[in-house]
Amino acid sequence: MVDEGDLRLLGPVGIWRSGRLLGPATPQQRSVLATLLLSRGQVVSLDRLSRAVWGQQPPVSARNAIQGYVSRLRQLLAQTVDVGLATASPGYRLDVDPMRVDLYRFRDLAGRARTSRPERAGDLLREALRLWNGPPLANVAGEWLRETFSVTLTEERMTAVEELLALDLDSDRRRDAMAELSLLMSEHPLRERLAYLTMTALHQEGQRAAALEVFRETRQRLVEELGIEPGEELQRLHQQVLCADPPRTRASSPEPVPPTDVKTGTRVPAELPRPVYGFAGRGQELKWLDDSLTGEDRVCVLSGTAAMGKTALALHWAHREKIRFPDGQLYLDLRGYDAELEPLTTAAALNRLLLSLGVDTTGVPGGFPARLGLYRSLLAGRKILLFLDDARSETPIEQLLPPSGSVLVTSRHRLDELVVRCGARRRSLGPLPDPDARALVDGVLGTASTRQEEDARDELVRLCAGLPLALRVAAANVAARPEASTTAWMTELTAGNLLAGLVVDGTGNNPVMTAFSGSYRALSATDQKIFRALGGVVEADFTAEVAAAAGEVPLAVARASLKTLAAAHLIEHHATDRSRFRFHDLVRLYAAAEAARTPAWPAIRQCPSDLEFLDSQSPHAPPDVHFWGSAVACC
């Protein structure tokens, strides 16, 4: 028991201290507490709190009643420590250490178990499951909270139970595990994972007939009650038993079978890739996502320069908020700017989504329109998150939009047509502020030990100009050195060229250059030419007239090209003068490098310094336009 107070969701909702229940006293107050805990650290609107208490038909006095419930909750929470319930427009925010809440302790223990050795994993899972005291949210008011969250929470518990049973089957707890499996199969006859474990255990015991009978009964129930066949993994195991193939040595290692929604018979996908470790900052952007994807079926676009951390931010938010999407999370990499693979076609993307939903696309007739109709039918009315990563254009996104649920898109392009035609919300991601960039570096390297090291890290943050990928590469290279000294590595980096120096040690790979090159390759030949030309312009910002002179093109062509480059986040508008544009520091270095590599650009020559100016002799350059050579070309 946690002396300073336990906050519980996994069973009856309540606040406990030293083994004693403090409250809340009424179901309505418990609904408010549960909603705030489920959105820990985020602002929860009064409308959502009202829905949690009364469903879709709140009384006229709902706002005043919610304020009263919050006031009484504050009195209860005052008896614990380090818990804050703040008023924050348009509602309230509960700030609490996640390890004080049974749900988040459960998730932490279950997550650690998945990366631990089997003996330790079993102990962690047993500790996690002991936190459950009955059905989740058992004593809240109304049905909205339970209908929205209980299925997902119960699924998390059953997944942990199945993982523990798989481990126990490979230990001296085998007999107990088999007995528990028998009981669970009678309670959950449609869970294919339980059937898989039961069949595996019986097969390992030499009881082939019994294992085959489990498959027969499970298949019959799935067909009769849901109208579906068993999944691929269960059918593969059935064939192994039929052929008397040796069973797996570890029952805990089958390929996972996505859970099935017993109401609809469709799979509940959980496809989010692993989040980026050491994520830092982006508080305003996370709040924007919270506000934009709460309560309604919305489309949100995160756009920004290559290597700006769009996918990392989207993944961080999606993992944090996946409980909002009890019907699953679909993920698809559209490969818009992949260095080696062509962008995913809309038809291929649709086929992958159907496979994720458990559909055998080889048996769907009628081509693309029929499959698109099936896809929309499967997702109609479902609270699902569709994460479309690295989009290059609006076309596949528009066609793949589900009839309900939320869509999160990342792209290097602004995708303005999605805003116009689909009502999407869009936010451009800028560089990390210096404090957040420094937090990212410190997260990789630990606390600086000397003042000299502090100053070196601040200089590293300045040179990388808030670009998360550049910061990660630099910090990783420092961490890989035996002396782990930013000071020593910075001396080496600044002796050469910054962009060329951002190579991952021992690989020869420059992730930042690779990311920028994907955006550059997507441009037309004219836009590429102007981009290269602008890489040689000395001024911190520039106009269309400067671009026309530098690129030796008509002014109208230069204006159109600047709009294209801005939409692709290769340049940006000046903060106070929309007629002027500017580069991110590292993108400028890349543009200069491309100019130096391109024979068609004679005005730039190699030089020993990034800031060595050239006396331009170009007849197309006005007197106030100067050009400089990039040290990238000299290194």
Image (cartoon, helix red, strand yellow):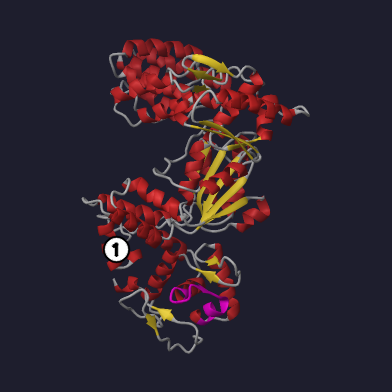
Q: Nearer the viewer, residue 306 or 356?
A: 306
* Percent of width and height locating residue 347: 54, 48
Quadrant in the picture for the C terminus: bottom left
Q: Is residue 142 above or below residue 456?
A: above
- According to the picture, the residue beneath numbered tag 1 turns out to be 493
Disc 1 marks a residue whose amino acid type is Leu
Residue 264 appears anywhere in the view? no
Q: Give the residue drawn at x 35%, y 59%.
A: 460
535 is within the stretch colored magenta? yes
Q: Is residue 578 above or below residue 11?
A: below
Q: Is residue 238 above or below residue 450?
A: above
Q: Is residue 509 left or right of residue 373?
A: left
Q: Give the residue drawn at x 48%, y 67%.
A: 583
Q: Give the residue drawn at x 48%, y 47%.
A: 313
Q: Give the residue drawn at x 56%, y 63%.
A: 567
563 is within the stretch colored magenta? no
Q: Nearer the viewer, residue 294 or 377?
A: 294
Q: Is residue 626 left or right of residue 117?
A: right
Residue 60: image quadrant is: top right
Quadrant in the picture for the N terminus: top left
Farthest residue to the left: give it. 482
The magenta stretch is 534-549
Residue 414 appears anywhere in the view? yes
